[in-house]
Amino acid sequence: MAAVHENGTPRSPNAASAPATPGTPAPLFSASRVDSLSYERKSMPHCAGKCLPVGVATWGSNPSCFADIPAPDISLTRKLGAEFVGTFMLIFCATAGPIVNQKYNGAESLLGNAACAGLAVMIIILSTGHISGAHLNPSLTIAFAALRHFPWLQVPAYIAAQVSASICASFALKGCFHPFLSGGVTVPSVSSGQAFALEFIITFNLLFVVTAVATDTRAVGELAGIAVGATVLLNILVAGPSTGASMNPVRTLGPAVAAGNYRGIWIYLIAPTLGALAGSAVYSTVKLREDEITGPTRSVRSFRRQESLAV
């Protein structure tokens, strides 16, 4: 027999068993959670037949893959604020090392420059990774979006925050260390081809590690900051004297704008992005599949802690 309300009207089969509290507003978004860095593959929409309708019946229909992305659990404004602060800290610290090295006649050394960037990355990931994912790098953001770990809708806003933070940090450095800003600009000291190859390879290394610790449940996610920071430090020791070891378009763009030196900037915009796409794609290809797991797996985690979904 169908359930009825006390006033005799039929109750909907899908209605909740307990009445809603009077005056309680309906939730604006669903209860689904979105991790800002390790955007779960199963939560991303499948675009077959939506973004690229190829059938006669579906040709010309409105694509809905972007509209199907679930709402994040942290406001985009807060994510962008954390991303801006994190990128500002990274560019300020990573660029200040070479500037101080130039101003004080090699006081920092190559190891000191590498430590400035590596330690900055580690600290920022540990402090803001649970808010914004601590991308700090447009190449990383694009690579994760391309591999469906991050929503494309948020990519322009993230890149805008990263670029603006880089420019602000660079002009802050210009005010603090003028006229020695040129020491912090990444320009190649080798041929363009060699510089392109170096930037591609070291960014490949970086994104291979980042994808491992951020998206694979079998990686030790709690050590993500240390692993990524150590990779940055190692890459600078390898490629720092040759290219400045940018690995990040905004690491080059901000100081170049502040110093007015754009020599070879195309290398630092294209090579890291291609290297990031390749590194992230290769790890996604070689990582173990669920049916290949023989031992117990760890709970899903990334740069940000997983919160309880209980309501």
Image: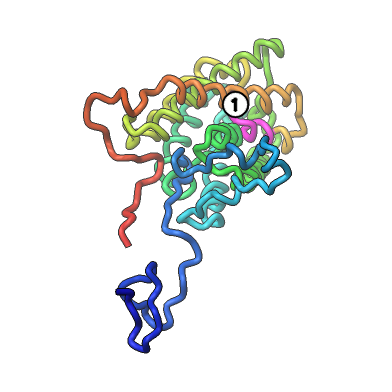
Give the camera-side residue of 302 and 78. Answer: 302
Q: Where does the magenta region start and end?
A: 245-255
Q: Residue tagged by mark 1?
A: 246
Q: Could you tell me which residue is drawn at 49 percent across and 61 percent down?
A: 29
Q: Is residue 2 visible?
A: yes
Q: Is residue 172 visible?
A: no
Give the camera-side residue of 151 and 139. Answer: 151
Give the camera-side residue of 32 and 258. Answer: 32
Circle 1 packing at 10 Å, graded few (<14), some (14-19), many (20+), is many
List x then y, in percent, for residue 215. Answer: 41, 34
Image: 237 above or below 219: above
Tell me if residue 250 is in the magenta stretch. yes
Image: 78 above or below 39: below
Image: 236 above or below 61: above
Q: Could you tell me which residue is drawn at 37 percent across and 89 percent down?
A: 7
| Amino acid type assigned to the residue bearing label 1 in the image | Ser
For the C terminus, which image quadrant? bottom left
From the viewer's perspective, tell me whether residue 51 is left or right of residue 114: right
Colour style of the rendered protein structure: rainbow
Q: Could you tell me which residue is drawn at 53 percent across and 43 percent down?
A: 45
Give the camera-side residue of 303 and 102. Answer: 303
Looking at the image, the residue that sits furthest to the left is: 295
Image: 175 above or below 142: below
Looking at the image, the residue that sits furthest to the bottom is: 7
Magenta span: helix, strand or loop, mainly?
helix
Q: Could you tell me which residue is drawn at 54 percent across and 49 percent down?
A: 69
Tell me if residue 63 is in the magenta stretch. no
Find numbered disc 1 in the image and state the secondary structure of the residue it sits on: loop
List x then y, in percent, for residue 19. Answer: 34, 78
List x then y, in percent, for residue 35. Answer: 44, 46
Question: Residue 252 sits in which quadrant?
Answer: top right
List x then y, in percent, for residue 149. Answer: 49, 38
